[in-house]
Amino acid sequence: MRAARAPPHWPALLLFCLCGLWVQGCAGTLPNHAEDQALPTAQEYRSENGVVSAVLEAREDTVKIGAVSIDAMTYNGSYAGPVIRVRPGELIRVHLINHLREATNIHFHGYQGSPKGHSDNMHVVVDPGQSFDYELRVPLTQPPGLYWFHSHLHGDAERQVMRGLSGTWIVEGLADQLPPIRGLAERLLVFKEDRLETSNEPFVNQVLHRYIRSISGNLSTGFTMRPGETQLWRIANEGADQPVRLVLQDHTFRIIARDGAATTHEIDTGELRIDPGGRVEVLIDAGPPGRYELSSPGVYTGTGKVRRLGEVEVLGIPEAPSPQLTQFPAVEDLRLRPAASTRTLAMTENPAEGEFYLDGKLFDHRRIDTRVPLGAIEEWLIRNDSDEYHSFHIHQVSFQVVEINDVPVPFDGRRDTVEVPVRGSIRIRLAFTDPLIVGEFMYHCHVLEHEDRGMMANIEVYDARGPGQEICTTGR
Ligand SMILES: [Cu+2]
């Protein structure tokens, strides 16, 4: 471990136009590969006596995604990534061994505990051949739901995540908050993306255009449901740069949680959109017997192109759908609290230089960009003063979106990752009220290409009263 990250060396990657990627990437229909038809069993770690212990070996691997071989970086050989299941109050121990030929580290996305020491500390750098013991106490107040962890090494995060260095953590207890979902069949869908610089395979070139979007480690997937059966799908976008759009033919997604936290009510939609780093948890009520296509419409192409991701076959003995959810956990509407400070944040870029900025500055790990006293409720206006897609994410705290493009947004819960519209803005409220988060952490664009190229900043939450003083901790 090094104590701090040296100034970044920019990897010799080509700047990659998001629009161009989607224009190329979404056409065509994938052939059915027999090996695609089942979701692989993830390597799962569960807690014993309040502790979940995982050994994660970061290494280079050649992995098969459907019929396509890619040069991957994985934890323990699994491209889809391991899964850690934990409950609030328990301890996560991860022994990271770096077998790569380059440095790496791990960020636990959505973790609302300490950013210091061996916890979710972004100043940790694990050099090749070295190891590091992460130890994270899951706060009792951590919302139960879906989270993920990934490499967060500034300058290399996009490439390492694209090649596979991520996994999933699930905080158990969602059914305690939403009892009608107890006992439902549960599916975990992990989306990742990779792009190959070259390929000799016509299928990869002509159908995939060398853009490998995978679903739980496969090019496509398929599974069955009974007519009327309700399932819980937990869907994570662990891709580096791209939003995921998802449609299940003739079916509705009943959103019950987003970014690991229950929403304030059920939100029904025919099409999911998940920003990079984002997660949703949805209920699906299976329709009449038949085969239904799972697909991803293209983003920004305007051409209506669709990538087929698999299908759900509905067959067997009918079941009664689970009842509508009427009771959701109480979450405070942060608009009802006075904001101690209002800040404005601009996302800008210089395409000619391949540089991306927050407030006109490239990231510098030695610089604290924002200082916030513990206990503050703040309002941030985040502007996208550029012509491309950005996604805002902050470590350690979730936030409430109150406006998009100056239009008020109905309160429906907290997020930790959200799109900032092109040439538009979002206004969010953040509660820096939990003493656990005192320390330094980061906020950034979760298009990791942009983060690597500078669109990130440091925040310090400090305890103005000094350690050991009473601080109001309501308003999470
Ligand atoms: Cu961005």
Image: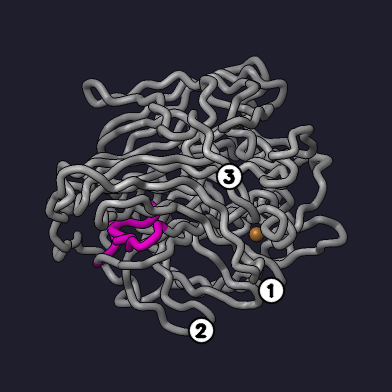
Residue kind at label 3, given as amino acid type = Leu
Q: Secondary structure at mark 1?
A: loop
Q: Which mark is residue 245?
A: none
Q: Which image quarter has ligand 1?
A: bottom right
The stretch in magenta equals 248-265
Residue 264 included in the magenta stretch of the image: yes
Query: Mark 1: is the Cβ under 8 angstroms from ligand 1?
Result: no
Q: Nearer the viewer, residue 263 or 34?
A: 34
Above-or-below relation of 39 to 459: above
Q: Which mark is residue 30?
A: 3
The image quadrant of residue 269 is bottom left
Residue beneath disc 2 = 406
Q: Position of residue 470 (x, y in %)?
A: 27, 53
Of the residues under marks 1 and 3, which one precedes in the sequence? 3
Q: Secondary structure at mark 2?
A: loop
Q: CA distance from mark 1 to mark 3?
A: 37 Å
Q: Nearer the viewer, residue 104 or 335?
A: 104
The image quadrant of residue 224 is top left
Residue beneath disc 1 = 385
Marks 1, 3: nearer the viewer: 3
Q: Position of residue 203 (x, y in %)?
A: 69, 39
Residue 154 included in the magenta stretch of the image: no
